[in-house]
Image (cartoon, helix red, strand yellow):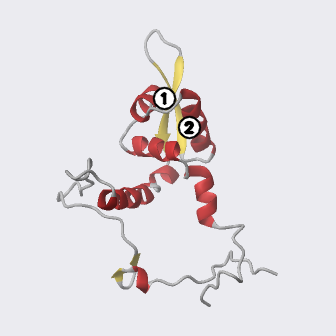
Amino acid sequence: MLLNGSEYGTDNCSLMRTLEIVGERWTLLVLREALLGRRRFDDFQRSIGCARNVLATRLATLVEHGILRREPYREPGSRRRDEYRLTEKGRALSTALAALTQWGDRYLADPAGAPIEVVHRECGDPVRAILACDRHGELRIRDLALKAGPGAKRIA
């Protein structure tokens, strides 16, 4: 059955739940930096430029939800500190960040072009985020339909 938005509630919407965790500017920038290989608090802070307390809160949230994990380290002569490493759950967000970046590169990039290009390590060709069906490959928006999933809740 195709989804009729007026018949179903949105209180258990997966997009809404995702945005509650990662849908804030600084959180997305932390994830970008983690995907680029940053791991330490000071490196995140220097790179994205947000306030230290905001960064600490964002990192704690990402750890709480299993997107990052803390790993202790100690520089010689210094106190123990934590690095933040992406988990499998965190690495799975790379597709969403790639799609957002691809949109930004298309509509918001400087006239000179995108500042970073994502390419396939093996062949060097550009990589892009797409919507695809296992049977038919890449799809356009007009090829899509929404249907009620197993978690859909009818409005009484």
**Location of mark 2 (residue):** 59
Work out whether residue 86 or residue 52 is closer to the camera in this orientation and state it: 52
Alpha-carbon span between mark 2 and mark 1: 9 Å
Q: Residues within 10 Å of mark 1 (few under 14, many from 20)?
A: some
Left or right: 142 as drawn, with respect to 89: left
Work out whether residue 25 or residue 56 is closer to the camera in this orientation and state it: 25
Outermost residue toward the front in this view: 111
Q: Residue at x 44, y 16 (%)?
A: 75
Q: Earlier in the sequence, mark 2 or mark 1?
A: 1
Outermost residue toward the bottom in this view: 1
Q: Residue at x 59, y 41 (%)?
A: 63
Please determine whether, in this image, residue 77 is positioned above or below residue 60. above
Please determine whether, in this image, residue 109 is positioned above or below residue 52. below
Residue 56 on image: x %, y %: 57, 32
| Marking on residue 130 | none
Residue 118 on image: x %, y %: 27, 54
Please determine whether, in this image, residue 31 is positioned above or below residue 151. above
SS at badge 1: helix
Q: From the image, which quarter does the N terminus lie in?
A: bottom right
Q: Residue at x 40, y 41 (%)?
A: 33
Left or right: 4 as drawn, with respect to 24: right
Left or right: 112 as drawn, with respect to 84: left
Query: Marks 2 and 1: CB-CB under 8 Å?
Result: yes
The quadrant where residue 151 appears: bottom right
Residue 9 on image: x %, y %: 72, 74
Residue 84 on image: x %, y %: 49, 35
**Location of mark 1 (residue):** 41
SS at badge 2: helix
